[in-house]
Amino acid sequence: MNFIKELSWRGMLQDSTPGAEAFLNEGPTKGYIGFDPTAPSMTIGNYVQLMILRLFQLSGHTPIILMGGATGRIGDPSGKDKERQLKSFEELDSNLNFQLDQAKKFLSFEGENAAIVVNNLDFYKEMNVLNFLRDVGKTLTVSYMMSKDSVKNRLESGLSFTEFSYQLMQAYDFQKLYTDQNCVLQMGGSDQWG
């Protein structure tokens, strides 16, 4: 199955990086979609993303479910006109476990391209703020971050430093998955473009 053609045929592809289809046709690779546990259950939008991971796996690739144990504690500013109410760590952990149980019903965790689950809290729980700012904050410029729609759309109503930092965490998530899992592809909703 040609993954990109399948997504296009189903009306599930809006944007892609130039060369993605040719790259995916070269052979099996790993790709991920992130899920923040801000709700007690998966949403319809989450199920669309899980179907994309399922089609990715059926195309011979290895899907990675990135559970946002850390990013869920911060709150994604995209698509919001005001800051999210922060949830307690206990509520987020409960949501994460329930959502993960739901997600596991869509993918195969056995065989050659068995699905992988990663919790991004594991990336951050031992990292202190100085190391994060020095090692991760140094990699993106404020002007680049300010150019993103998720930031521009919130400037007038107010954007906390916490939410502004969300994209740093997303970038570090990708870097960690690339380094630790040899993952080269991020998939997600249109808000992931910025």
Image (cartoon, grey):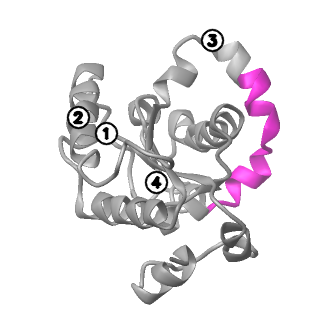
Residue where numbered disc 3 is placed: 128
Residue where numbered disc 1 is placed: 37
- In the image, residue 2 sits, relative to residue 166, either above or below, namely below
Position in image of residue 3 (x %, y %): 53, 74
Name the main secondary structure of what is drawn in magenta: helix
Amino acid bearing label 3: Asn
Instruction: Describe the element under mark 4 as helix, strand or loop.
Output: loop
Residue 135 location, quadrant: top right
Position in image of residue 124 (x %, y %): 56, 21
Please name the residue shown 66% across and 68% down the image.
Answer: 24
Q: Are marks 3 and 1 in contact (CB under 8 Å)?
A: no
Tag on residue 157?
Answer: 4
Amino acid bearing label 2: Asn
Instruction: Describe the element under mark 2 as helix, strand or loop.
Output: helix
Q: Gap between marks 2 and 1, in whole Å?
A: 5 Å
Q: Nearer the viewer, residue 133 or 117?
A: 117
Position in image of residue 77 (x %, y %): 46, 50
Amino acid bearing label 1: Pro
**Disc nearest the viewer among 2 and 4:** 2
**Disc nearest the viewer among 1 and 4:** 1
Please name the residue shown 43% across and 59% down the image.
Answer: 53
Q: Gap between marks 2 and 4, in whole Å?
A: 28 Å
Instruction: Describe the element under mark 3 as helix, strand or loop.
Output: loop
Q: Nearer the viewer, residue 59 or 9?
A: 59
Magenta residues (range):
133-148
**Disc nearest the viewer among 4 and 3:** 3
Residue where numbered disc 2 is placed: 95
Amino acid bearing label 4: Ser
Residue 130 location, quadrant: top right
